[in-house]
Image (spheres, helix red, strand yellow):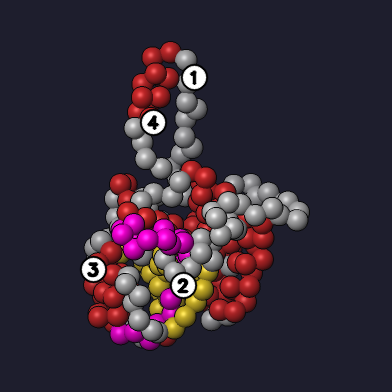
């Protein structure tokens, strides 16, 4: 069995946080490859399925980020699995947005979820690091990580998560270089540039029926009315919202 642990914080208040990109990836993989519905076990939400013919368990720890290792270690012990059977997906400040890198072992790099897994399980497991970019100043890191992705980020975030889900069978097979190459190719002009803007694509990729990120949502957002009392109320509400 292969285990993929996507890291994040539970609860709707954290759903769009940059720190929760691991949860987003796990949701998209489960949706794309027809995994079972999520259920609670091991202090986590889990879903079961197959990737490339390999039986796979998706885990989203519900312990909050700093205690992620409790859920992951419990699952590994239950199934009598080793660190070679584990891949952890997490956000990475030191990678530009829409970049994906895989490494095995190493330090936690200030990531509390990784630090917890290291403490409970050991360090010699694969990590899929998903770039969220750095705010540029150390004092802004906390707010950046626990802040929501902006609406404009959807231009690169949705195709990025889709590419990860589409190519997840390569992760189960251990074909890490092929996975990273395919994600990079899939992004093409969707990757943001160094200033956060969207690069111009040479050609427009074929559209999909619906992104896996959107499929995983409960329902599409209702159209916001432009006139009347509801419009006034929503305008007031959104004017106080932070992206």
Badge 2 or badge 1: first in the primary sequence = 2
Residue toward you, 225 or 4: 225
Disc 2 crowd, CA 10 A, few/some/many (<14, 14-19, 20+): many
The residue that disc 1 covers is: 226
At horizontal 67% and vertical 60% (from top left) the residue drawn is 188
Badge 2 or badge 3: first in the primary sequence = 3
The nearer-to-camera label among 1 and 3 is 1
Please say whether residue 6 is one of the residues in the magenta stretch: no
Cα distance in 3D space between marks 1 and 3 = 45 Å
Q: How far from the left and from the top, in percent, is residue 75?
A: 30, 74
The residue that disc 4 covers is: 238
Looking at the rendering, the stretch of residues picked out in magenta corresponds to: 122-142
Cα distance in 3D space between marks 2 and 3 = 19 Å
Which numbered tag is attached to residue 128? Answer: 2
The residue that disc 3 covers is: 67
The nearer-to-camera label among 3 and 4 is 4
Disc 3 crowd, CA 10 A, few/some/many (<14, 14-19, 20+): many
Tell me if residue 229 comes above or below residue 103 in the rendering.
Answer: above
Cα distance in 3D space between marks 2 and 1 = 43 Å
Badge 1 or badge 3: first in the primary sequence = 3
Q: Is residue 48 left or right of residue 169?
A: left
Q: Which quarter of the image is occupied by the C terminus?
A: top left
Residue toward you, 1 or 43: 43
Badge 3 or badge 4: first in the primary sequence = 3
SS class, disc 3: helix
């Amino acid at each position: 069995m292969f285990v993929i642990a996507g890291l994040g914080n539970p609860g709707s208040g954290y759903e769009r946080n940059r720190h929760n990109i691991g949860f987003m990836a796990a949701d998209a993989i489960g949706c794309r490859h027809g995994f079972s519905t999520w259920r609670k076990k091991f202090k986590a939400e889990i879903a079961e399925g197959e990737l490339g013919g390999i039986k796979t368990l998706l885990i989203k720890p519900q312990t909050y980020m700093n205690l992620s290792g409790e859920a992951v270690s419990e699952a590994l012990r239950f199934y009598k699995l080793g660190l070679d059977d584990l891949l952890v997906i997490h956000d990475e400040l030191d990678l530009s947005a829409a970049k994906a890198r895989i490494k095995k072992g190493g330090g936690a790099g200030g990531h509390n979820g990784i630090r917890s897994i290291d403490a409970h399980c050991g360090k010699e497991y694969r990590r899929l690091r998903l770039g969220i970019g750095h705010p540029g100043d150390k004092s802004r890191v906390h707010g950046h990580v626990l802040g929501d992705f902006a609406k404009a980020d959807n231009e690169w975030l949705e195709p990025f998560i889709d590419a990860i889900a589409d190519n997840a069978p390569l992760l189960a097979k251990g074909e890490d270089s092929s996975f990273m190459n395919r994600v990079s190719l899939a992004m093409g002009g969707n990757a943001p540039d160094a200033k956060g803007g969207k690069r111009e694509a040479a050609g427009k990729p074929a559209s999909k029926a619906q992104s896996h990120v959107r499929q995983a949502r409960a329902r599409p957002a209702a159209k916001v009315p432009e006139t009347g009392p509801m419009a006034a109320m929503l305008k007031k509400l959104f004017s106080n919202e932070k992206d």
